[in-house]
């Protein structure tokens, strides 16, 4: 069995997970009924499109990633910094606490050949060698484009703590991460770390790395609140009333990383369209929003630029402040207005 598949679900783990109020009928469930419109009749056509219909789905050249500047990133000048590495990978420095969210730095987001899902940038795994010690590694769920075996393996000596959704711990243990470093969270679970409050928030998605363990691990987003700044990371998921609930309970937020990309009408309930992502940002009460889950991989059939272009259009129509930095750029929360449309340089 390939190591990339992660840990197996055991009877003991199932018993532990079943204690969650979100575990029903032998698996985790969303807050509302959620499904994908994929069946045996449309699956062959969908697969043929996914791997044969490639026009516009990939940039014509590798997207560059700016070199990591340790001095600039660590010298935060009394504000928080972040770096986006494409897709949903975000590195945060909150006043000296280094937090890495969904570190997926591999070149391929699929564990099974020949169905490779290649990154838009050249392999950036080596960037991990340049990063400082990671105080806290956060994960939204265990899908391959978020929980990456190669990245975990490369980071293992740098990471002090791993905070993950329920059911994800087994994968990290399989990959030789010490169980003492791992803490699992259910929805609305809270914990303080270095005077920063973290809350694992609901999303409308799914979990699992194999067919046999579908939804045997939880999914969600993160609220991150320091005494000076607040962040919201949506994780993957379709639109729903949970965004308004998060905003009411935990908002407002200074900055939000909102999923926007890899959408399709066949799975519209587990991935948001751009107009829904903007509405989610408004529901959560985010001051400045950045679309993520794009510029990394093509996991749907839309043009690679469509998520950001449509998101900006809807955000401006709704009066929503937005920013989209270049890959690898260091963004200070005091000066997060990054509106140079760098993607226009690439076909």
Image: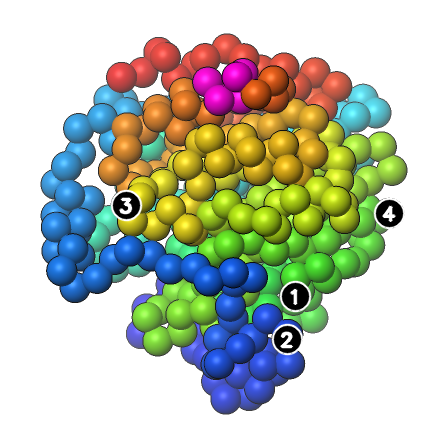
Secondary structure at numbered mark 4: loop
Relative image position of residue 231 (x, y in whole percent): 70, 37
Q: Residue at x 50, y 45 (%)?
A: 239
Reply above or below: 309 against 125: above
Whole-Å distance between the Cαs marked 2 and 3? 34 Å
For residue 165, what is the image quadrant? bottom right
Ranked by sequence position, the earlier of labels 1 and 4 is 1
Q: Is 188 left, or right, of 307 in this rendering?
A: right
Within the magenta stretch, is there residue 316?
Answer: yes
- Give the residue at the far bottom of this rendering: 11
Ranked by sequence position, the earlier of labels 4 and 3 is 3
Whole-Å distance between the Cαs marked 1 and 4? 21 Å
For residue 56, what is the image quadrant? top left
Q: Is 124 left, or right, of 223 in this rendering?
A: left
Ranked by sequence position, the earlier of labels 1 and 2 is 2
Relative image position of residue 66 (x, y in whole percent): 49, 22
Whole-Å distance between the Cαs marked 2 and 4? 27 Å
Q: If the image is split into quadrants, where does the N terminus sit?
A: bottom left
Q: Decide: marks 4, 3 in contact (CB < 8 A)?
A: no
Q: Which residue is mark 3?
A: 117
Q: Which residue is mark 4?
A: 195
Q: If the image is split into quadrants, where does the C terminus sit?
A: top left
Q: Decide: marks 1, 2 in contact (CB < 8 A)?
A: yes
Ranked by sequence position, the earlier of labels 2 and 3 is 2
Ranked by sequence position, the earlier of labels 2 and 4 is 2
């Amino acid at each position: 069995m390939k190591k990339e598949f992660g840990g197996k679900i055991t009877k003991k783990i199932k018993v532990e997970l079943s204690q969650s109020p979100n575990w029903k009928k032998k698996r985790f469930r969303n807050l509302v009924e959620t499904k994908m419109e994929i069946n045996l009749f449309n699956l062959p056509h969908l697969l043929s499109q996914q791997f044969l219909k490639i026009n516009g789905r990939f940039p014509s050249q590798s997207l560059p990633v700016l070199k990591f500047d340790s001095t600039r990133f660590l010298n935060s000048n009394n504000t928080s910094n972040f770096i986006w590495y494409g897709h949903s990978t975000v590195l945060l420095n909150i006043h000296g606490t280094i937090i890495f969210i969904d570190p997926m730095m591999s070149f391929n987001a699929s564990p099974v050949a020949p169905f490779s899902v290649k990154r838009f940038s050249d392999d950036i795994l080596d960037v991990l060698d340049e990063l400082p010690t990671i105080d806290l590694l956060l994960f939204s769920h265990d899908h391959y484009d978020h929980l990456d075996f190669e990245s975990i393996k490369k980071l293992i000596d740098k990471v002090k703590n791993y905070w993950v959704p329920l059911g994800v711990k087994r994968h990290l243990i399989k990959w030789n991460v010490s169980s003492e470093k791992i803490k699992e969270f259910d929805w609305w679970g809270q914990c303080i770390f270095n005077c920063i409050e973290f809350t694992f928030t609901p999303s409308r998605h799914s979990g699992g790395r194999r067919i046999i363990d579908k939804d045997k691990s939880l999914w969600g987003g993160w609220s991150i609140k320091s005494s000076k700044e607040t962040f919201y990371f949506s994780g993957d998921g379709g639109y729903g009333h949970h965004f308004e609930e998060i905003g009411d309970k935990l908002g407002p937020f200074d900055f939000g990383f909102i999923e926007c990309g890899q959408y399709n009408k066949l799975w519209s309930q587990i991935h948001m369209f751009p107009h829904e992502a903007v509405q989610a940002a408004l529901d959560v009460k985010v001051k400045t929003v950045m679309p993520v889950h794009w510029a990394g991989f093509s996991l749907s059939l839309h043009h690679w630029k469509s998520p950001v272009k449509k998101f900006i259009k809807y955000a401006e129509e709704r009066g929503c402040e937005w920013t989209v930095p270049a890959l690898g750029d260091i963004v200070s929360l005091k000066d997060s207005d990054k509106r140079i449309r760098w993607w226009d340089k690439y076909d």
